Image: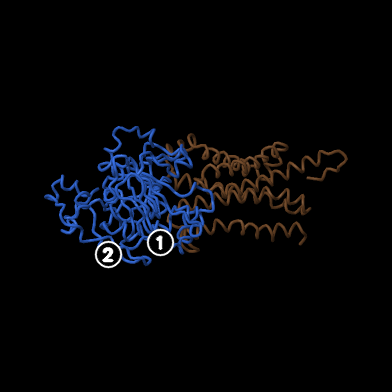
Chain colours: A blue, B brown
Amino acid sequence: MRKKSNLIRPSEITSESNYLNRRDFIRAGAIAGGSLIAPSALSAIVPDSRLATLPGVSKSAYSTDEAPNSFEDISTYNNFYEFGLRKEDPVVNAEDFKPRPWTIEISGHAEKTGTFDFDDFMQPFDLEERIYRMRCVEAWSMVIPWVGISLADVVKHFQPTSKAQYVAFETLNDRAQMPGLRGRSLDWPYREGLTIAEATNPLPILAVGIYGKVIPNQNGAPIRLVVPWKYGFKGIKSIVKIHFSSTRPKTSWNMAAPNEYGFYANVNPGVNHPRWSQARERRIGGSIFASKQETLMFNGYGDEVAHLYKDLNLRRNF
Amino acid sequence: MNTLQQIRFVWKPIIFLICLLPAVLVVGDAFGITGGLGANPIEAILDRFGNWALRFIMIALAVTPLRRMTGWNWLSRFRRMLGLFTFFYAFMHFVTWFVLDREMRVDDIIEDLTERPFITLGFIAVLLLTAMAVTSVTAIRRRMGRNWQKLHYAAYAVGFLGVWHYWWQVKKDVAEPALYAAILTVLLGARVVNHWRNKKPGRHRPSR
């Protein structure tokens, strides 16, 4: 599942964020040591024009080698209720959305807090391409070549204190730009959260691009969460707030239907949604007669994340 | 041509072709001729057939109240065809689920039917529609006598089950199922009002 990559540049090896990020490799002996000396030569520069190519993107060893879905499928089949309830709504209704200027507020139990302009927020981090499987709770899946920054790097950068047990996220709540907010389908703003252990796992990213280009509005521009071992609804879009919390944050789908959507929402073929089976999934992009495929525990990312839940009853904590 | 002949040889074929159009468009879209079905074609086909089944049960149930309101008795000549189209779209929805979505896996299908109430509801509706479709043949109708009408009151149950099935299936967007529920309430309400009026003494009972 993991592809050992030889494409790591020296500039990345010496950066602190990548050093921390790639501890697995160091442990595996793939890299013969790292240093904490030099700051990154790359900084995450995200152009503010639509679909512009992202510069300085490195490959990631966490990418799957499965074939990615087409850009068209990824950018036209979206669950983004702020822009309408049907899958084909966001691509139309997010057309005029303005992902700039954008600020991200960091608050709660951390040494560094405040409101940051998007460019300043991104500057300390490195852009990586991560090709991840995405399993929706509705039993379909895609493979998406995201470009983003490691969430673990972001969390560490803001230096959460020992009181920070959870990381909470919020989506923009702007009625003028998001027609779906007029409906009361969910209790706005959209909210999501992770435990601090989940957020500092190397897999989650804050994505700013797809297929090497600036992320389309309907996919959560300018920045959205991607947690590949969890159901897609955990991947909160168009993030404006990140809060380090001592208590478990409320999360939108859990608030809407607590018996159907849990806080953890780990992909789990053994625990069915009350109204449908989670045992198998339909990979988007196949023919009408293509078979569904077996859903994998933790969406196939068990090697990286199963240890996080070894003392947890995953049936109760679905 | 008298009026009856005109209905039979002109209007019925025209209405038939119009009713068939949604199915033709699904096939056309599936082959990319008339459009497309998007990233998840099976879901799209399921939704399209299911939605049309609901629309047709509403249209079929609208015939009688509309006839009473307008006095256009010829409307009832189209009731069987509209009912059969309801069956057709519901059955296509069922077949899409059975063959394309569940891939004819018996275990999955039994699990769905027994553990997922919204699927059970939909399945009962398809069974009722099948019984009504089979008994819609004139010869069988005659032979069944009064039992025919009793069985065909199931059309009300089909409307109710269909809306309920849709309501339970959606994740959050109850706007459409709510719209169908409102229409169904009006259509069944009209019958209740009619029944209540006819019970009033001193009023002439209109012919059915």
* Residue drawn where x is 49% and y is 62% of the image: B35
Number of disc labels: 2
Q: Residues within 10 Å of mark 2 (few under 14, many from 20)?
A: some
Residue positioned 28% across, 39% down in the render: A306
Q: How far from the left and from the top, in percent, is residue B4?
A: 75, 56
Q: Which residue is mark 1?
A: A99
Q: Chain of mark 2?
A: A
Picture layout, residue B5 above or below residue A257 = below
Crowd band around label 1 with a 10 angstrom C-alpha radius: few (<14), some (14–19), many (20+): some
Residue assigned mark 2: A55
Q: Amino acid at mark 2?
A: Pro
Q: Which quarter of the rendering shows the N terminus of chain B?
A: bottom right
Residue A3 image label: none
Outermost residue toward the right in this view = B202
Give the Cα separation between the discs numbered 1 and 2: 18 Å
Per the image, label 2 sits on a secondary structure element best described as loop
